[in-house]
Amino acid sequence: MSLYTGRGDDGNTDLRDASRVSKAGSRIGAYGTVDELNALVGTIRPTGDDDVDDTLAAVQNHLHVLQAEFANPSPGDDDPTIQAAHVERLEAWIDEFDAELPPLESFVLPGGSETGSALHHARTVCRRAERRAVALAEETGTIREQPLTYLNRLSDLLFALARLRNHREGVPEESPTY
């Protein structure tokens, strides 16, 4: 199988249901940004912490499911979709990692260690993916609530992981000054 087909040379691409849409469309923007997030998370691993690496590996698989869901205008019962269990897993990880951290008393400037900074970067890309998904939902009315909730919660997890890696590496958090 060739890596190139030429089918996208005209600025269109295929969705999972074989319909053709513009590469500039909101659906492509949503799942393309999730793809960008997935690739960014892939650059963060390995972090040196098995629990963080295992979490990020699972998140990458979730993001692949999310991309498949966004690429499918009308998922059937057998198609991959983000479920409540995915969101619940994120919440359990957030609670687990947050328990290791000092209480958050103010806003935190993104940065710190190399891994902490990369996780903050991933959080901002996740927020952009969420905005694109919300725009797609508003435009088409076909996006379920679970993928939107998942992206919202994932940004919280990435924030917690950024704080965790900085904490484990002994890098102090900086608060903004006003």
Image (cartoon, grey):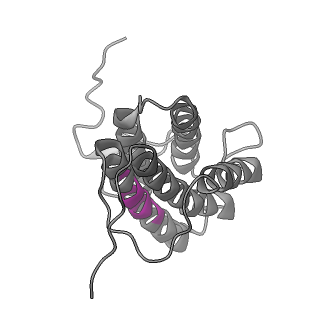
Residue 125 magenta-highlighted: yes
* Residue at (38% x, 63% y) in the render: 128
In the depicted view, which residue is nearer to us: 121 or 129? Answer: 121
Q: Is residue 145 magenta?
A: no
Task: Estimate the x, y position of residue 112 in percent, counting from the top left.
Answer: 30, 54
Q: Going by the picture, which residue comes out furthest to the top?
A: 1
Q: Nearer the viewer, residue 113 or 70?
A: 113
Picture coordinates of residue 17 (x, y %)? 56, 41
> Residue placed farthest to the left in the image?
9
Could you tell me which quadrant the C terminus lies in?
bottom left
Residue 79 vs residue 35, the one in the foreground: 35
Which residue in the rendered view is the most extreme toward the front?
170
Query: Residue visible at 30% across and 47% down?
Result: 113
Answer left or right for 92 relative to 30.
right
Residue 98: x and y in percent read: 60, 56
Compared to 125, does 41 lie above or below? above
Quarter assignment of residue 129: bottom left
Q: Residue 68 at x, y = what percent? A: 55, 41
Region rendered in magenta? 122-130
Asked if residue 141 is positioned above or below residue 169 in the image, the reply reads: below
The residue that appears at 43% across and 29% down in the rendered structure is 48
Q: Using residue 102 as the reference point, say whether residue 84 is left or right of it.
A: right
Would residue 148 be visible to someone looking at this image?
yes
Q: Is residue 153 above or below residue 93?
A: below
Q: Quadrant of the N terminus?
A: top left
Please name the predominant secondary structure of the magenta segment in the image: helix
Instruction: Determine if residue 21 is in view.
Output: no
